[in-house]
Amino acid sequence: MLGTHFAQQFRQAYFGDNWAGAALMPWLRKLSFDKAFEQHSSFEQPPIHLAAHISYYTRKLNEVFQGMPLSGTDADSLEWPIIKSEEDWIQWLILIEKEAKEVSDMLEIMPDEAFYLPFANSGYGTVLKNVSGTLDHLYYHLGQLVWQIKAVSIN
């Protein structure tokens, strides 16, 4: 039951039909390669920076759910990928979408008991805490990202 609930929340946050009326992928797909790296005077960073930061934590969930050790640091979440062309941009969007779908699919089949187990190790809290925190974090930054995309799109 928890797995189905969180899988639906991830799908809605990434692809739409959620309480916020905005989802990550539709907004990123509105953004061209050039605009992704454009910095508006109202923001410290271009949209790619925030998009990479948001997707970093979903990637870490995905890796741990696939049995990989948790690696990386919060500082790593502030790095953006090397994207040099429109094709690179499109491939990166496909990767983000793939990772979100994989996390959603894994959550959907996860038994309720698994949500109360340690995430990677006990120092990171439970799976429930990390899944819920990743969603909260995504929505927190999604509003900022929408504003950034709107700002660079009207320039």
Image (cartoon, rainbow, N blue to C red):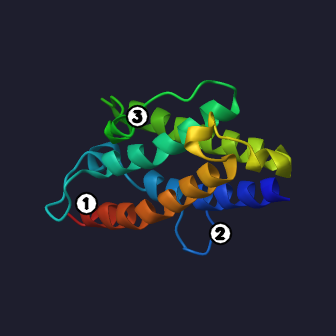
Place of residue 25 in the rendered image (x, y in percent of width and height, measured from the top left): 52, 53
Q: Which residue lies at the image location 33% right of the left edge and 67% below the top edge?
A: 147
- Label 1 SS: helix
The label number, if any, that marks residue 116 in the structure image: none
Q: Is residue 138 above or below residue 66?
A: below
The residue that appears at 44% across and 30% down in the rendered structure is 72
> Is 87 drawn above or below residue 21 in the view shown?
above
Q: In front: 3, or 155?
A: 3
Which quarter of the figure is the C terminus placed in?
A: bottom left
Residues at discs 1 and 2 in contact (Cβ within 8 Å): no
* x and y, in percent, of residue 123 in the image: 56, 40
Q: Which residue is mark 2?
A: 17
Q: Quadrant of residue 124?
A: top right
Under circle 2, the secondary element is loop
> Label 3, on which residue?
73
User: In the rendered structure, which amino acid carries the disc numbered 2?
Assistant: Asp
- The amino acid type found where label 1 is placed reads Val
Circle nearer the N terminus (3, 1): 3
Alpha carbons under labels 1 and 2: distance apart: 25 Å
Dot 1 or dot 2, earlier in sequence:
2
**Eye-nearest disc, 3 or 1:** 3
Q: Is residue 124 above or below residue 64?
A: below
State the image coordinates of residue 17 (x, y, percent, origin top left): 65, 69
Residue depicted at 19% across the width and 53% down the height: 39
Front residue of 67/151: it is: 67
Separation of marks 3 and 1 at Cα, in angstroms: 29 Å
Pick the quarter of the image with the N terminus: bottom right
- Residue 74 percent coordinates (x, y): 38, 40
- Amino acid type indicated by mark 3: Thr
- Crowding near the residue tagged with mark 2, few <14, some 14–19, many ≥20 C-alpha atoms within 10 Å: some
Q: Which residue is mark 1?
A: 152
- Label 1 crowding class (10 Å Cα cut-off): few <14, some 14-19, many 20+? many
